Amino acid sequence: MGIFDRLTGKKPEKSQTMGEERAVPRHIAVIMDGNGRWAKKRGLPRKAGHKVGAETFRTIATYCKDIGVQYFTVYAFSTENWKRPQDEVDALMNLFRTYLREAAETMVKRGVAVRVLGDLSVLPADIRQQIDEVHALADTLGEQAATASLCINYGGRDEIKNAVRALAREVREGRLEPDAITEDSISAHLYTAHMPDPDLIIRPSGEVRTSNFLLWQSAYSEYYFTDVLWPDFSTRDMDAAIDNFNQRSRRFGGV
Ligand code: IPE
Ligand code: IPE
Ligand code: MG
């Protein structure tokens, strides 16, 4: 039995690489790291790295859809990234401003529904408005479409805290018994409520940590680390990550 059969009980998706059939994970997530170092190496401002990194997102998300990955989720801006110098935060917000809707339009044409996850309440109003438009576009594709999710002002601990607050409110209002809270009901209160947990989480740029990404959802994810900086990350690097993933034995605590 293959890893996917064991996990989902479903037949794995097949993709073609160099004429060979291979299984692809249902949900791949990426910590898009290394933009600043990519720019520094070239004597460019950090924001130049973010711009190229945004294009890499579009390329890799579309590639994932083409090879049969159902969910592709990336970390674009963490709840901790507000600590960066104001000019870098401004540059990132400006990038979301100029890029989000335009990218979503081109990606929807390729069959990829773009969604934004995170605490969006503190984002500038014009960006929130664009995100609403991006979600309306995604809705035109229907539920079976491949989904690319951008996590913005996302933090794993913040997400769990918000879920706990929502559940606590339900208890206070008498709509939920504390003992009726299950792992599934916690999952259902996360931003990723309608997705399976990630099978594979990729972190480029040489760092080997989660930096607060998908803490609850990654309980049994396979991690793949590479020194490639995100703006340089190519479809070949994605193939290498998937091939590596396919060599692993996922036991989920069993034998
Ligand atoms: C990732 O690249 C993008 C964001 C965190 C917004 P970085 O900006 O962290 O790039 P490095 O790690 O400094 O190279
Ligand atoms: C993680 O990268 C966040 C994103 C990629 C959006 P960071 O560059 O912020 O992480 P640390 O600071 O190296 O842990
Ligand atoms: Mg970084």
Image (tube, rainbow, N blue to C red):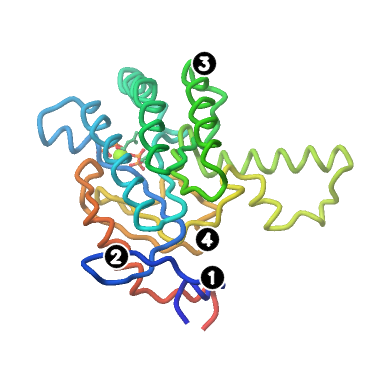
Q: Which residue is mark 2?
A: 16
Labels 4 and 1: the sequence-earlier one: 1
- Which three-letter amino acid code belongs to the residue tagged 4? Ala
Q: Nearer the viewer, mark 3 or mark 2?
A: 2
Q: Nearer the viewer, residue 230 or 253?
A: 230
Labels 4 and 2: the sequence-earlier one: 2
- Which three-letter amino acid code belongs to the residue tagged 2? Gln
Q: Which residue is mark 4?
A: 219
Label 2 CA crowd tier, 10 Å (few <14, some 14–19, many 20+): few
Left or right, 163 with reference to 250: right
| Tag 4–tag 2 contact (CB < 8 Å) | no
Q: Secondary structure at mark 1?
A: loop
- Which three-letter amino acid code belongs to the residue tagged 3? Ala
Q: Which residue is mark 3?
A: 125
| Tag 2–tag 1 contact (CB < 8 Å) | no
Q: Secondary structure at mark 4?
A: loop
